[in-house]
Amino acid sequence: MTELEILDRIQRRVLWLSAWMVHSANARPSVDGLKVGGHQASSASVVSLLTALYFQALRPDDVVAVKAHASPAFYAIHYLRGRLAAADLEQLRVFGGLQAYPSRRKNPEIVDLSTGSMGLGAVAATFGGLAARYLGDHGGAAAPGRFVVMVGDAELDEGNVAEMLGEEVVGRLGNVLWIVDVNRQSLDRVMAGTRPRQLAEMFRAAGWRVQELRWGRALQARFARPGGEGLRARLESLPATEYQRLLRLPAGGVRNWITVLFAYWLTMAMAGVFVFGLAVMLQGVAAAVLPRRHFVRVSPLLQLATFCVVVGGYFLQPIVVRPESILAA
């Protein structure tokens, strides 16, 4: 079994465990009936990154500030590493149990740096790297090797992140690595489609070296085929909301969606021609049989009806042709 296959098996267990933890936390009886949440999607989006980080890339002297909303996946990883017991996983978001956001004060055996409230952990880790660099340059004790920061794209909306990036010296640190999970989602909205590019340019403008990992190996192989550049351009131009909808389609769903969409618009075009022709014919009949004063009243109504049918069909398209409702063949 190759190293990649081993990591894939591990990440599948991490994903299952993190989802089970959130489900278990919300299935607990509560006095008021309220759920405790758990950021399941935000946690699931970094399972591969966290698995590669903790089971392959980290060095013994590295310090990690974990994405706060990824705490279920983070705890699942430490369970698989033998640093948490199974009973601990049942205590997610319980008073005295595993915290919603990783906390060094409450779980010091597994947490390097506290990462709540949002944005504070990432900035604290970055300035920790600056302090470690200063101590190393001035004869201090041996400092941690690297400060690894993992954040979500919505977390970068926090004002202290922008203030940190404004510090010129931070962009020249060689011992700080930021991993930004661009899952295009926030707790209250889907992120704007232009947001990923804005984030990259924001870091570049502050002097950071940015490497974007946008597409996996399977898509890169398809980009290399004939027509691949068109596919890449289309995916990069997709609005975030449409991109999220396509992600939920089963295998073959995109092909079926395109087929149904083409058939829908062809039908709408034919219906539009028919309705327009019918309106012209009715106007001709009305002009022949109605007095002029009545025809003047009827003609605008026929034109308005034609307009409403065509435009109404256009606006109904996102409702009628929903990608997630189209099953694979």
Image (cartoon, rainbow, N blue to C red):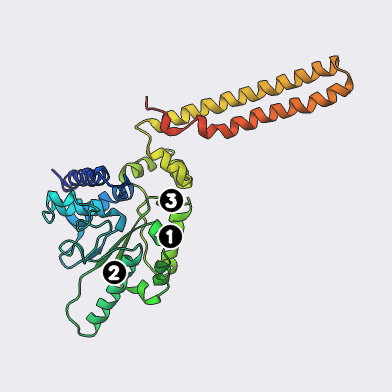
Looking at the rendered structure, the kind of residue marked 2 is Ala
Tell us which disc is closer to us: 2 or 3.
3
Q: Is residue 204 left or right of residue 72?
A: right
Looking at the rendered structure, the kind of residue marked 1 is Leu
Dot 3 alpha-carbon crowd within 10 angstroms: few under 14, some 14 to 19, many 20 or more? few
Residue drawn at (46%, 44%), measured in percent from left and top?
Answer: 241
Tell us which disc is closer to us: 1 or 2.
2
Residue nearest the viewer, comparing 148 with 226 = 148
Dot 2 alpha-carbon crowd within 10 angstroms: few under 14, some 14 to 19, many 20 or more? many
SS of the residue under disc 3: loop
* Among numbered discs 3 and 1, the one appearing first in the sequence: 3
Distance CA(mark 3)–CA(mark 1): 19 Å
User: Label 2, on which residue?
Assistant: 125
Q: Is residue 96 left or right of residue 256?
A: left
Residue 222 falls in image quadrant: top left
Provide residue 17's location: percent of width, then percent of height.
20, 45
User: Label 1, on which residue?
Assistant: 199
Q: Give yes or no for contact between labels 1 and 2 (Cβ–Cβ under 8 Å).
A: no
Q: Residue furthest top?
A: 289
- Which of the image's four quarters has the N terminus? top left
* Among numbered discs 1 and 2, the one appearing first in the sequence: 2
Residue nearest the viewer, comparing 281 with 124 = 124
Residue drawn at (44%, 41%), measured in percent from left and top?
Answer: 231
